[in-house]
């Protein structure tokens, strides 16, 4: 079995919706498929990918196969996103500080075209 990664799993909107459904209630394959317009084989393929990524476990109960959520792997996504949240928070804080500094200085005169230092010609 090919090992897939959690980012691949959540890249598809249908798989994200399956994760949402199963996280609310364990469902057998037909119950999951009933929520979608696509074919049952297509839903089975999505569920197989989610299983390979470790986001869903299959549990056999009699003749039915139930999908159970195992969402610990989503922490990888949260950790990845968090590093960018910290980056942008720092950038926005720096911008806020800069804007406050400009505001304290008050309005600055706008130089007239051609009144700046002359450019040297080569």
Image: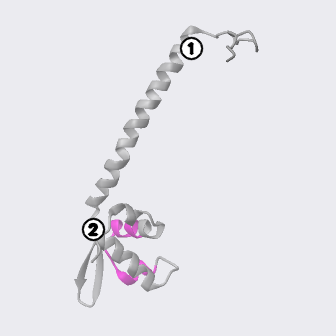
**Residue to which mark 1 is pinned:** 103
Instruction: Please report the residue visible at 34 percent of the width from the left and 54 percent of the height from the top.
Output: 77
* SS under mark 2: loop
Q: In which quarter of the image is residue 104?
A: top right
Residue furthest to the front in view is 122
In the visual, does 113 lie left or right of 19?
right
Q: In which quarter of the image is residue 103?
A: top right
Assess disc 2: are there few (<14), some (14-19) or many (≥20) residues with their C-alpha within 10 Å of its C-alpha: many
Instruction: Please report the residue visible at 47 percent of the width from the left and 66 percent of the height from the top.
Output: 13
In the visual, does 24 lie left or right of 38?
left
Residue furthest to the bottom in view is 63
- Residue 30 image offset from top left, x and y in percent: 39, 84
- Secondary structure predominantly adopted by residues drawn in magenta: helix
Mark carried by residue 111:
none
Mark carried by residue 54:
2
Magenta-drawn segment: 18-34
Instruction: Please report the residue visible at 44 percent of the width from the left and 85 percent of the height from the top.
Output: 40
How is the rendered protein coloured? one colour
Q: Viewer-proximal residue, 64 or 8? A: 8
Assess disc 1: are there few (<14), some (14-19) or many (≥20) residues with their C-alpha within 10 Å of its C-alpha: few
- Residue 53 image offset from top left, x and y in percent: 30, 68
Q: Is residue 12 above or below residue 79?
A: below
In the rendered image, residue 27 lying in the magenta stretch gets the answer: yes
- Residue 99 image offset from top left, x and y in percent: 53, 20
In the visual, does 89 lie left or right of 28?
right
Instruction: Please report the residue visible at 27 percent of the width from the left and 68 percent of the height from the top.
Output: 54
In the rendered image, residue 48 lying in the magenta stretch gets the answer: no
In the visual, does 65 lie left or right of 33?
left
Give the alpha-carbon distance from disc 1 to disc 2, as whole Å: 52 Å
* SS under mark 1: helix
- Residue 7 image offset from top left, x and y in percent: 37, 60
Q: In which quarter of the image is the C terminus?
A: top right
């Amino acid at each position: 079995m090919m090992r897939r990664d959690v980012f691949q799993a959540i890249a598809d909107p249908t798989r994200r919706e399956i994760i949402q459904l199963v996280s609310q209630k364990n469902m057998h394959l037909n119950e999951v498929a009933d929520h979608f317009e696509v074919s049952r084989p297509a839903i089975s393929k999505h569920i197989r990918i989610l299983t390979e990524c470790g986001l869903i476990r299959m549990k056999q109960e009699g003749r039915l196969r139930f999908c159970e959520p195992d969402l610990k792997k989503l922490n990888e996504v949260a950790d990845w996103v968090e590093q960018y949240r910290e980056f942008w928070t720092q950038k926005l804080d720096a911008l806020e500080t800069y804007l406050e500094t400009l505001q304290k200085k008050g309005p600055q005169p706008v130089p007239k075209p051609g009144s700046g230092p002359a450019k040297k010609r080569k």
